[in-house]
Image: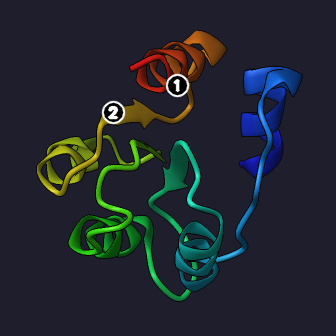
Amino acid sequence: MRELVRVVLGGSYRFVEAEDGEQALELARRDRPDLIVLDVMLPRLNGLEVLAELRRDAELSTIPVVIVTAWSHAQSLAVSSGADHFVSKPFDPDDLKRPVEELLSR
């Protein structure tokens, strides 16, 4: 999934990748990214748990988050949990590229 995101978004972004949800939170706290692409299916903490932690943290709560998952039924939960955008797998590259570009241009 991480490789696919890098390929879809191309070389114009700097990527920091996490292997699990706990590492994702550590990296977010350390690097303060401009945007997070977050899969729901992560080991240790799932993507929705990571999202909840991000939204509770005053310093991270405004970082745009795009949730990506094969669980199409998770869309309403992701959005109600504070996701800025939801992309269902499998996805067309533009389905990810378009919201990322829009969120970063705000």
Residue 64 picture location, percent across and down: 39, 42
Up-down relation of residue 72 to residue 55 (above or below): above
Residue 17 as seen in the image, left or right of residue 23: right
Q: Are marks 1 and 2 in contact (CB under 8 Å)?
A: no
Mark 1 belongs to which amino acid? Answer: Val
Residue 97 horizontal/vertical position (percent):
59, 18
Image: 10 above or below 60: above
Question: What's the residue at 31%, 40% (across, down)?
Answer: 72
Image quadrant holding the C terminus, namely top left
Front-most of residues 35 and 98? 35
Of residues 39 and 18, which is closer to you in this image? 18
Residue that label 2 marks: 85
Q: CA distance from mark 1 to mark 2?
A: 9 Å
Name which residue lies at 56% across and 67% down: 28
Question: Residue 27 falls in which quadrant of the image?
Answer: bottom right
The x, y position of residue 93, in whole percent, is 65, 17
Mark 1 vs mark 2: which is more N-terminal? 2
Q: Which dot marks residue 39?
A: none
Count the labels in the image.
Answer: 2
The residue lying furthest to the front in this view is: 59
Q: Is residue 78 left or right of residue 103?
A: left
Task: Check disc 2 and give the amino acid type.
Answer: His
Circle 1 residue:
100
